[in-house]
Image: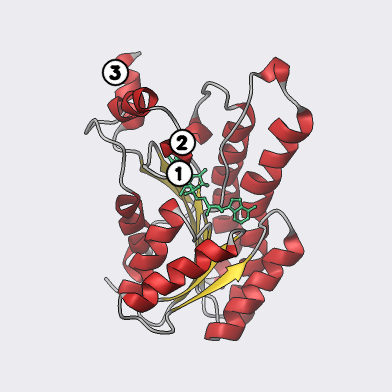
Amino acid sequence: MTLDGKVAIITGGASGIGRATALTFVRKGAKVLVADIDLAKGEEVVAEVEKAGYPGAAVACAVNVAEFTEVEAMVARAVEAFGAVHVIFNNAGIAGGAPLLEHDIEKDYHRLIRIDQDGVYYGILAAGRQMAKQGTGGVIISTSSVYGQQAAELSFTYSAAKAAVISFTRSAAYELAEHGIRAVAITPGRVATPIINQFSEELRATFAAEQMRGVLTDPQEIADVVAFLASDESRVINGTVVNVEDGYSAFKQRLD
Ligand code: NAD
């Protein structure tokens, strides 16, 4: 399995799942635009890539995925740096939420929707337009969550946004098939990144116990699957969800 000759944009590439995926993609031969709202941390990932022996394989780019003009500029930056776009991993996202009846509508609804939902839509649209223009085909991978398929505590808006990511993926696959572009969503469960690591040790242990192996998923384990989904070897996986949650859903059903 190789990503030789592929150019990939990874949003949220400065941390957690995105960072691990950027490092994995370059090891498999891709050129990567590490796109993140935190440019300094994106530059750190690029430095890691250089140190690992892949000079020029990654470039950092500042982007707020909640702004379409910035997402368009991000796609243009990838083309400027590497000549084309073959893969976009719409992965940037934030967690958060409050009990429904206590919602601050701006903070607990609109802000999350702008980043976790609109940001994915903008990535699909801007990269999809570029891939169609190139005529090369491509792959659109987007990060949903197990919460996109269920209700969960304090997750009214997050669950809605992550469910939309799955719906966008199905429809994008349907609409873009004629351009040789496929779309896949992934649903992580509990991954050891800053989103999870901010919680107490006790809560993290509870999260770990919800997965089959009883441990938090390592971001590298998600990156390995994303690399496969970006490769031609996964060409029959299209318009669907790939659960990367270590049996979380099956285990939950058993507990219930
Ligand atoms: P993370 O916090 O390590 O990484 C998220 C990255 O997104 C950060 O680098 C952050 O700067 C960036 N980002 C945030 N807002 C942005 C914006 N507006 N524009 C551009 N970049 C922005 O967390 P992670 O766990 O690696 O999260 C990656 C994705 O995985 C998210 O979509 C998250 O919802 C999803 N997810 C994570 C878990 C988990 O357990 N960690 C579970 C399910 C889904």
- Please state the horizontal and vertical placement of residue 246, each as a whole percent of the image: 29, 37
User: Which comes before the other along the chain, label 3 or label 2?
Assistant: 2
Where is residue 156? Give x, y as percent. 62, 26
Between the residue at mark 2 and the residue at mark 1, the CA separation in whole angstroms equals: 6 Å
Question: In x, y percent, where is residue 174?
Answer: 57, 56
Which residue was labeled with disc 3? 254
Instruction: Looking at the image, tell me whether mark 1 or mark 3 is earlier in sequence order.
Output: 1
Element at label 1: helix
Q: Given contact means CB atoms under 8 Å apart, are the residues at marks 2 and 1 in contact?
A: yes
How packed mark 1 is, by other alpha carbons closer than 10 Å (few <14, some 14-19, many 20 or more), is: few
| Frontmost residue, 244 versus 132 | 244
Q: Are marks 1 and 3 in contact (CB under 8 Å)?
A: no
Q: Quadrant of residue 223?
A: bottom left
Q: Residues within 10 Å of mark 2 (few under 14, many from 20)?
A: few
The three-letter amino acid code for the residue at tag 2 is Gln
Q: Which element carries disc 3, helix, strand or loop?
A: helix
Tell me how far mark 3 sits from mark 2, CA to CA.
28 Å
Query: Which residue in the structure is indicated by mark 1?
Result: 194
- Asked if ligand 1 lies within 8 A of label 2, the reply is no
Of residues 22 and 254, which is closer to you in this image?
22
Q: CA distance from mark 1 to mark 3?
A: 29 Å
Mark 1 close to ligand 1, CB under 8 Å? yes
Q: Is residue 98 left or right of residue 249?
A: right
Which one is in front in this view, the residue at disc 1 or the one at disc 3?
A: 1
Amino acid at the residue labelled 1: Pro
- Of the pair 59 and 125, the residue shown nearer to us: 59
Helix, strand or loop at mark 2: loop
Residue 198 - label: 2
